[in-house]
Amino acid sequence: MLDFHSHILPGLDDGAPDMETALAMARIAVEDGITTMVATPHFIEGSMENNRDLILGKVTEFQRVLYEVNILLKVLPGCEVFLSPDTPARLQKGELMTVNNKGKHLLVELPLQCVPSYAEQVLFDLKVMGVTPVIAHPERNVELAGKPELFLNLVNRGCLMQINGGSINGLYGKKVQKAARILIINGLIHFIGSDGHSCNRRTTRIRKALDTIEKFRAGQKNTVMGYSNKVINGEDLIPITPISIDGPMINIWQKCKEKIWSFL
């Protein structure tokens, strides 16, 4: 299994504060069946400016320690970039880490409450540069969750979607869980990440979420893993997407609530 989004690198952001915690998070991941993990520390202008060179060095160091203590986890470089008007310029300067340093995909985070007015232009500019934006946990964005058709709009504009395992399992509440499952049912999930920050509440586990994805949409588990492997190898990904989000699917929680919760 491949975890597309984690905050496991020690001492860089609000994830693992030290090497001891990072190693404990790695052990949890391996026990869950994860063999490869993309380390995605935050890049937030003015507060957590974890640039490309810093991340590469930290990944190399952490991988060495994992080898020394015999934890069989492959860690790849990445970054979770808080989207701003300056994102394309910073990427062009080489400051931002793309997924596995391939220069093809960039994990970007939107504010949790809204889609900012500059987002459409910035996402377009990234595409023009030949870099595909991967939207981190869009199900947690209040504006997107309230208008599920906006998920499809982003995908049709060339973005890809990464869902959090915890969202599927209700970690962030029922509204986020509802949005996550609308995405799953409509085939709009391309990657899954633990978004692991610690050994406790937000852990490095995704197996249970992947099993739930499979129950909602047969074959999607393998599809998501296949997409992830393509992207970490720097391959282009053009997934098949629906023409529209089916209205009954949006209302599925009202019509089929008991059936959905039977999967838990």
Image: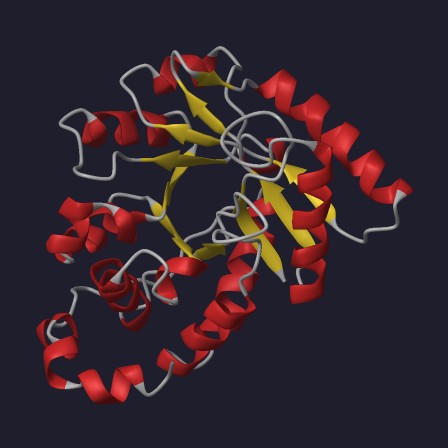
Percent x, y of residue 82: 36, 28
* Residue 149 in view here: yes
Identify the residue at horizontal 45%, vertical 78% (top origin).
214
Percent x, y of residue 39: 60, 39
Quarter location, residue 23: top right
- Between 205 and 101, the residue placed more toward the observer is 205
**Above or below — where is 81 with respect to 105?**
above
Identify the residue at horizontal 84%, vertical 35% (top origin).
64
| Colouring convention used in this rendered image of the protein | secondary structure
Q: Is residue 70 left or right of residue 130?
A: right
Quarter location, residue 65: top right
- Between 126 and 19, the residue placed more toward the observer is 19
**Above or below — where is 47 with respect to 3?**
above
Identify the residue at horizontal 70%, vertical 48% (top origin).
24
Percent x, y of residue 230: 57, 52
- Between 220 and 64, the residue placed more toward the observer is 64
Identify the residue at horizontal 49%, vertical 10% (top origin).
93
The N terminus lies in quadrant: bottom right
Q: Is residue 236 left or right of residue 261?
A: right
Quarter location, residue 130: top left
Picture mark count = 0
* Residue 35 in view here: no
The C terminus lies in quadrant: bottom left
Q: Is residue 30 left or right of residue 71?
A: left
**Above or below — where is 248 with respect to 101?**
below
Percent x, y of residue 207: 56, 69
- Between 158 and 147, the residue placed more toward the observer is 147
